[in-house]
Image (cartoon, rainbow, N blue to C red):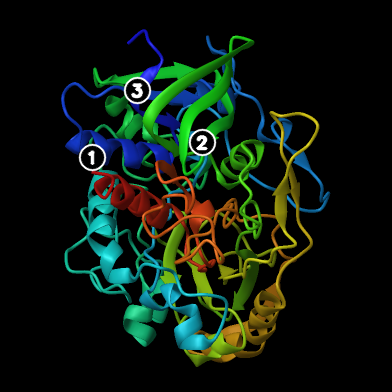
Amino acid sequence: MNDNRFDLIMVGSSFASSFFLKQYLEKAPTHAKILVLERGYLYPHTERLKAQRGEENFIANPNQSNNATFLNATDNKQWEFQTGFGGSSNCWHGCTPRFMPSDFKMQSLYGVAADWPIQYDELDPYYTAVEGIMSISGASNPPYPKHSAYPLPPHIFSTVDNILHNHYGNLYVHPPTARASIPINGRGACCASAVCSICPVNAKFTIENGLRDIYSDPRVELVYGAQVHALGAAHDSINSIHYIHDGIEKTAMAEVYALGANAIFNAHILLNSGDDNPLTGKGIGEQISLEARVDLHDLDCVGGSTKVNANGYMLYDGNHRKEFAACLMEANNTPYIRFERGKWRHQARFRMIFENLPENENHVSLTSDKLKPAVHFNGVSEYALKGIENMKKVLPDVLSCLPVEKIEYSALHPTESHILGSTRMSLTPETGVVDKNLLHHQYRNLFVLGSGAFTTYSPSNPTLTLSALSMMAADRSF
C-alpha cells in the first residue's frame, strides 16, 4: 500500500482499536485497504520483562512515558495509561467483569445521570465474543445474565472467599479475568505473584499475545511513530486525517475513520479538528477506590490463585443508587502480612471500587502545543463520596459472617487507571458526542471508540465493555 487513500483509517492499536479491527476484517472484502496509525512502537513483552527484572536487554523502551504526552493541570490527580503498540493492554491487570444491566439505566431506574442509548441485551453477544477471544476465566454463576460458560475454569478461592461465597452465593463470586487459570494459546497459568502490569509468565491477555496477527493481515498497513493530531472535516463527514511521522506532517484519506486512542487523546483530536459539540472533552473521569484492611480473629486468609481473587456485589445494586454510588468489592490476593506475631495471615484485604458521575468541570482542553492536550480535574462527585460514607457504615455487617476484629481504611487511591467519559454516548448531540454505534453525532463516517464513550461510570472494570462496544460498532459499520 503506497498511496494515501484507504477504506478505513484507524488511530491506535489499543483494546478499542484492535477489537474494532478484528471484527471489521471479518466482514471487509479481500481488496479492502486499512491504515493503522500508531503513535508508539512495539516493545515486546520479553524485553519489558527483562527491564522489569533489571536484566540486560537489547531493546530500550522506544515509547514516551504517559506523563510526557499531556499537561496535567491537577497535581494531585494521576492519569495512568501506556503508549505504544497494544496501548494499556501492556499494563492492565486483566479484570473483566461485565457491567450489570442496571448500569445502562441509571436515569430510568434511579433518577441519576443519564441512561445509555444501548442496553445490556444488545451488548450481550459481543461480551461473549470478547470473552472467547481473551479466554476469560470466571464463575459459573455470575450475578449478571450470561447464557454460556466462561472459556476457562475459575480461579481458586481463598479461605475467606469460601466463607463469603457460602454466605452470599452469586453475590460473591470467582472473578472474571483475562489472567489465565490454566495454560492456553501460549500463555501460562497465572502465578499469583501480583505483578500483573508485566506478567512474568505471560498469563494475561494482551494485544501482543492475543491479537497481533490481525495487524499482519495483507489488507492492513500499520505505521509506527505516527501521531495523529487532527481530522479534516467538510460539513457532516471527515475527509482527511493529519499526523506527524518522522518529523514530517502527513495527510491521508479514507471512507471511514476510527479514533481508538484513549479518552484524553480522542477528545483532543476532536478539539484540534474544530469539533464544536460543547460536550467534547467534558466529563472526563474514572471510578474511585480505597482499600479495606480487615483484621480477623484466629482465621488465616490463605490460598487463592490470582491477584484479584473474588468479586463482591453485596453493595452494588439496589435502590441505594438513587442516593449514593454502587460499590464493587475486589478481594486483594497481593502478598501481604499482618504485623503482629502469630497473626501474620489473620487479615483480609478488599479494594472497594465506587462508580462516579461525569461532571463537565472535569475536561480536556487544547494547549499551545497541538500534540499535547491538557486535562483538568476538579474533584470526585458527591454521589461517589456518599457511597464511601455508606460503605464504611455497613461493611461490618456485610462481613459479619467473618470473625472480624477491626477494619481500617486507606486513603483514596490516586487513580483506577480507567480514563472515562470525554466523548459520551447519547441519543442526541445535545446530550453527548457519539451515538449508540459510537459514530460521531455530526461526522457520520467517524467512529470514536473506547471508554471515553461511556455514558456513566459503572464501578466495574471497563475493558471488557469497551472491547465489546468496539466489536458491535464494527459489526454495524457494514
Q: Examine the rendered structure and indicate whether residue 467 appears above or below residue 121.
A: above
Circle 3: element type: strand
What residue is pinned by disc 2?
234
Q: Is residue 176 left or right of residue 390?
A: left
Q: Amino acid at mark 3?
A: Phe
Q: Is residue 123 left or right of residue 172?
A: left
- Tell me which numbered mark, 2 or 1, is placed earlier along the sequence: 1
Task: Judge whether residue 93 can be spotted in this image.
Answer: yes
Q: Amino acid at mark 2?
A: Ala
Question: Which labelled disc corresponds to residue 6?
Answer: 3
Residue in view at x 53 percent, y 67 percent: 456
Provide residue 192's location: percent of width, then percent of height.
43, 49
Provide residue 76's location: percent of width, then percent of height.
81, 53
Which quadrant is the N terminus positioned in? top left
Q: Examine the rendered structure and indicate whether residue 128 appears above or below residue 208.
A: below
Question: Which labelled disc corresponds to residue 457?
Answer: none
What residue is pinned by disc 1?
184
